[in-house]
């Protein structure tokens, strides 16, 4: 008899998962559409939901959306790596951030803000955009980042400070 690929499926699992997909599919598609080619957004969201289905017993029922966003970040990173032919010896040791062609940043109309966001680093940018665009609060950010609520609040505060410093006195939030 073949081994099962995941946990046994129940009617309650199917009902719960159907609700999850209905509630969060639009948010995930938007998340991916802001960060890459629109034509890939639905496929990437489907990949996240497939992972959620396989890991349904591990998924925190009280924090589904943050878990989905965290998984979406990993899925997006994996997808981007698939499209970049870069020999391992050519990968820079330091965290040089590639900005050219980044749809997430190209959507921002203000050149000064784009430059400030480009200078704060990938993690700070992720935190700022999850908070601003996806509307995640401290608890949800904590779930996405895999850290405590106080750690997420501190990370958001530090990211805002770095953005303010990068942008100078022009920023008002």
Image (tube, helix red, strand yellow):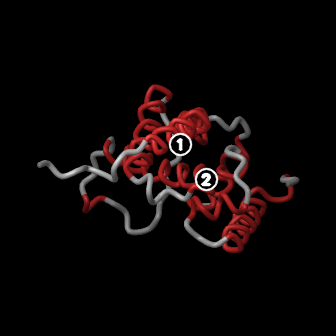
Please state which of residues 145 and 38 is positioned toward the viewer in this rendering.
145
**Residue 44 image offset from top left, x and y in percent:** 43, 37
Secondary element at image label 2 = helix
The local crowd at label 2, few if under 14, some if 14 to 19, many if 20 or more residues have their Cα within 10 Å, is: some
The residue shown at (45%, 60%) is 58
Give the number of the mark in front: 2 or 1: 1
Q: If you read the primary sequence from the N terminus, does the residue marked by circle 2 or circle 1 appear first?
A: 1
Compared to residue 151, the image places residue 82 above or below, namely above
Secondary structure under tag 1 reads helix
The residue to which callout 2 is attached is: 118
Q: Residue at x 33, y 41 (%)?
A: 83
**Picture quarter containing residue 20?**
top right
Task: Give me the residue at 55% from left, 50% from top.
Answer: 69
Q: CA distance from mark 2 to mark 1?
A: 39 Å
Badge number at residue 16: 1
Quadrant in which residue 94 is drawn: bottom left
Counting from the top left corner in percent of width and height, residue 105 is at: 61, 42
Q: Dividing the image into 4 quarters, which one contains the C terminus?
A: bottom right
Furthest toward the left, the residue is 1
Q: Farthest residue to the top: give it.
A: 39
Q: Characterize the local packing of mark 1: few (<14), some (14-19) or many (20 or more) Cα atoms within 10 angstroms.
A: few
């Amino acid at each position: 008899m073949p081994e099962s690929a995941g946990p046994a499926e129940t009617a309650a699992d199917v009902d719960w998962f159907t609700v999850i997909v209905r509630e969060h599919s639009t948010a995930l598609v938007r998340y991916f559409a802001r960060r890459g080619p629109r034509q890939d957004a639905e496929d990437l969201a489907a990949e996240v939901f497939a992972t959620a289905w396989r890991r349904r017993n591990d998924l925190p029922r009280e924090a589904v959306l943050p878990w989905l966003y965290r998984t979406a970040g990993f899925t997006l990173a994996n997808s981007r790596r698939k499209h970049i032919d870069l020999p391992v010896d050519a990968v820079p040791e330091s965290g040089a951030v590639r900005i050219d062609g980044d749809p997430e940043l190209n959507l921002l109309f203000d050149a000064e803000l784009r430059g400030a966001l480009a200078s704060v680093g990938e993690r700070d940018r992720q935190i700022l955009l999850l908070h601003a665009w996806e509307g995640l609060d401290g608890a949800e950010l904590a779930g996405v980042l895999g850290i405590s609520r106080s750690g997420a609040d501190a990370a958001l505060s530090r990211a805002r400070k770095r953005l303010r410093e990068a942008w100078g006195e022009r920023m008002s939030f």
